[in-house]
Amino acid sequence: MGVAEEREALVVALMRATAGEPWWRAGTPQAGEDALGDYLSRVHQWQRQDRVPYRRSRVRDRIQTTLNAMARATPAQVAALAELVRPYFPEERKPEAKASATTDNAVSGGAFHAPLIQAGSVSGGVHTYYAQPPHSSALPPVSEWPQLEAADPIVFGVRRTRRLPGESPLPPYVSRDCDRELDARVREAVRSGGLVVVTGAPLSGKTRTAWAALSANLPGATRVFAPPPGTDLRGLAALARGRGEESCVLWLDDLEGHLGEQGLTPTVLAELARLRVPVLATMDDEAYDARRFGTPAHAGVLGGAAPVELQRVWSAVELAYLDAFDGDPRLRAAAVWSGGQTAPEYLAVGPELMEEWRRARRLNAHPRGHLLVRAAIDLARCGVSRAGTPVDVLREAQAMYPEEAAAAGGESFEDALAWAVGIRHGVTGLLVPGERHDTWAAFGSLPADVDARADSSPVPLDMWKLAFDKAPDKGSRWTVRWNAHESLVPQADSDPEIPVVLAGINAAIGDIETAEFWYRKAADAGHTEAAATAGQLLASRDATAEALPYLEQAAEAGIVRSQYHLGVLLAARAQSWLTLAAENGHSAAAQTLPPLRKVTATPPDTVKE
């Protein structure tokens, strides 16, 4: 059976297997993984909800749709599912006997140097025909074409995404609205031959969508031929005729490069259709329109097959599919950070931008442009992202990277900014417009990719302060505070400056209790400025006994304000004891109190400054 027939048989088996009691939940040894059991439960529920006969077709459609999506994302699960419900499959149809009329050739009385015509018998003298060499001579035989199940989609034109250690070459396929129509077209092309064309805007995901349809609807053993643009395809039909039992498909990514007198012509396409060889192709919208309504030869190829159109802007349903992928960090980042770009644009352009930005740090490239983008990336890692950063803050942020700033002196700030915001691939710049006027933010994939790489430099500590101070609103400041805790708390024991930064952010946001904790932690690690502030905070809430050691630590280190506050606290304690002594009749204590009270008379908020 072909893929379509196998899929239809699986649908029937699933409906049979789930019509009764949920046997797969009863500890059956065949039950397999929980994911398969969950899927069977869903199908069982659909059948219970749609018991009315005329609604059974809706169940079949839902099963077919989910199976297609499963075949794209996890094809191994489809095979495991089929094995699980194998007893419920309908009796396999036997292949029909193929009647073939044969014609025996006989040549007598001479020699023939040309393709031989099936004509029974030929008699005569010596005949020599000088014919053009067969066009198939430069094409590899079908047996040498790679099999679909072993083919690398990136080699066949699918754009690579970010790939870090442990990540698969590509993230799971996200279902598109056109999948159902495309699947039906591909299955029909497998049965009857013909051309299927997927069109769309640049970076709309055409190639990935077409490849997913190919993988979902053709057997893994199918031979795939993807010739380079300009290849002479006139001998392709001759190769297909000699393929034997091999199933094959012609894959033409960017079809415009394969049209012309020696490429895919109406004649070649008709011959392939007669041989039931499907042709799956992709084209940009502009390229399709120019050729569909241009020369008659091109129109003859494209006019016989209405394109499957892939929309650039994703629908709510497609975005819901994207949001459902929690397991792949690339898709999660695309859902969160794509901003004004679609998921395919985000995934395809991101690696290119990352590589360009990384190489721009060279002195003869764009070192200041690299620095500005790095500052925007680190601000986004702090929490200032889509809101964007004003240009003057980007200029100020350069100081957070003194070595890089010194090395970037040969490039002006204006030239660096112009390079960073320039549009790449017709989609985006390294810096994109923020939500507010005259602000810029790093393209969404850059902060995500930098965060995901183990060799990335940490955000400079002073950048956290700058990000908090320049955050446009209260919500953004709380975001920076949250991100600072997530990033810095695990490292707080390694550097006393880290608790100081955390303390300052918490104090500025009004969480004095948390700020006090971090100031004390930094002071205990030997940070004298933190000791001074911790002493003041403790003194302000009358925790004098706890404040004194920190104030003494800071005062002995030469911090003047701590020396003053320590003196005031000690004088206040002395005044308290002298007052008690005077009340108990000590005359010298009574004489000392008035000048001491005059000296220690201070404004009530002095200690709390």
Image: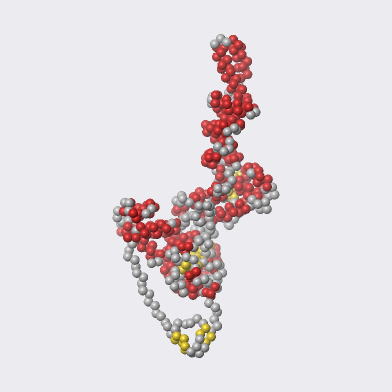
Percent coordinates x, y for residue 323 in the rendering: 46, 50
Give the quarter of the figure containing the N terminus: bottom left
Q: Residue furthest left?
A: 20
Residue occupying the point 58% across, 36% down: 496
Give the quarter of the figure containing the C terminus: top right
Please determine whether, in this image, residue 277 is positioned above or below residue 414: below
**Residue 454 at least partly seen:** yes
Percent coordinates x, y for residue 543 in the rendering: 53, 25
Percent coordinates x, y for residue 359 in the rendering: 62, 53
Please determine whether, in this image, residue 596 is positioned above or below residue 364: above
Percent coordinates x, y for residue 492 in the rendering: 55, 38
Image quarter for residue 474? top right
Residue occupying the point 29% across, 55% down: 20
Residue occupying the point 56% across, 36% down: 499
In depth, the one of 307 and 172 nearer the eye is 172
**Residue 379 at least partly seen:** no
In depth, the one of 306 and 536 nearer the eye is 536
In depth, the one of 544 and 606 nearer the eye is 544
| Number of residue marks | 0
Q: Residue furthest right?
A: 410
Residue occupying the point 34% across, 58% down: 85
Please determine whether, in this image, residue 585 is positioned above or below residue 508: above
Image quarter for residue 573? top right
Please determine whether, in this image, residue 120 is positioned above or below residue 486: below
Color encoding of the figure: secondary structure
In depth, the one of 372 and 569 nearer the eye is 569
